Image (spheres, rainbow, N blue to C red):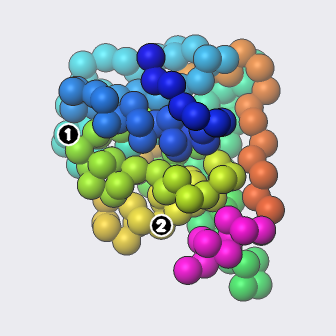
Amino acid sequence: FLVFSGAPTPGMKINAASRELNSNYFCTVWDDMVISSGMEPQLIKWLNMHKTVCATPILYSSHELTPSINVPSFNNSEFVTLAFLPFKDMTENFFPTDFCGIYNRVSFQRLRGFNEDFILPYWQLADFGVRNWISENRILSCNGFSCVYDSEPPHFDTTTGKDYSLFQK
């Protein structure tokens, strides 16, 4: 068990777990999700072949496809991300939706994981996406890997407060 003082963000939990692991890869999903396909040995071969930091799943809510491809954009001068439905295998993804995916532990740690200075999960993901993009790593959506939410997928708080100010630096 990992015990935290206070209420950790998802990024803090994932960072702590990645430091404790001895495996080359780790998978993150939520307790209200079911992995419906893709946890097979060929997925690890696929990850190695495409040198990805993270393979992201196709996400379903009540068996309805949900947007899981994230693309950075600007609305005037404000940073935003746009979410799209996955349309083809190995689509570049800016960050793993809802932190879900199979991560290459060494590559993840080279990026220093998720920035724990951010309080809002959305800004942890956005920061991770920018650092990943700058380092020319890849986050790819894998159509052969899918998860189903038992409940509705979360809606992230994207407000531009303290976290956005930190993000702009």
The residue type indicated by label 2 comes to Val
Q: Is residue 67 left or right of residue 157?
A: left
Q: Is residue 122 magenta?
A: no
Identified at 30% across, 49% down, the residue is 109
From the top left corner, tell me how far across and down residue 165 is, in percent. Answer: 67, 75
Q: Is residue 168 visible?
A: yes
Asked which secondary structure carries label 2, the reply is helix
Q: Main secondary structure of the magenta part?
A: helix
Report which quarter residue 151 is drawn in.
top right
Identified at 21% across, 32% down, the residue is 24
Q: Which residue is mark 2?
A: 130
From the top left corner, tell me how far across and down residue 108 is, in percent. Answer: 33, 47
Q: Write the start and end of the magenta stretch as one range.
A: 160-169
Q: Please, is residue 164 above or below residue 4 in the view?
A: below
Identified at 37% across, 71% down, the residue is 134
Asked which secondary structure carries label 1, the reply is helix
- What number of labels is visible? 2
Q: Nearer the viewer, residue 55 or 143?
A: 55
Residue extending farthest to the bottom is 77
Say few, some or many: other residues with alpha carbon within 10 Å of mark 2 (under 14 / 14 to 19 / 20 or more).
Answer: some
Q: Is residue 15 left or right of residue 96?
A: left
Q: Earlier in the sequence, mark 2 or mark 1?
A: 1
Spatial CA distance of label 2 from label 1 is: 22 Å
Q: Which residue is mark 1?
A: 48
Q: Quadrant of the C terminus?
A: bottom right
Kindly report which numbered mark, 2 or 1, lies closer to the viewer in this rendering: 2
From the top left corner, tell me how far across and down residue 139 is, in percent. Answer: 40, 50
Q: Please, is residue 94 above or below residue 142 in the view?
A: below
The residue type indicated by label 1 comes to Asn
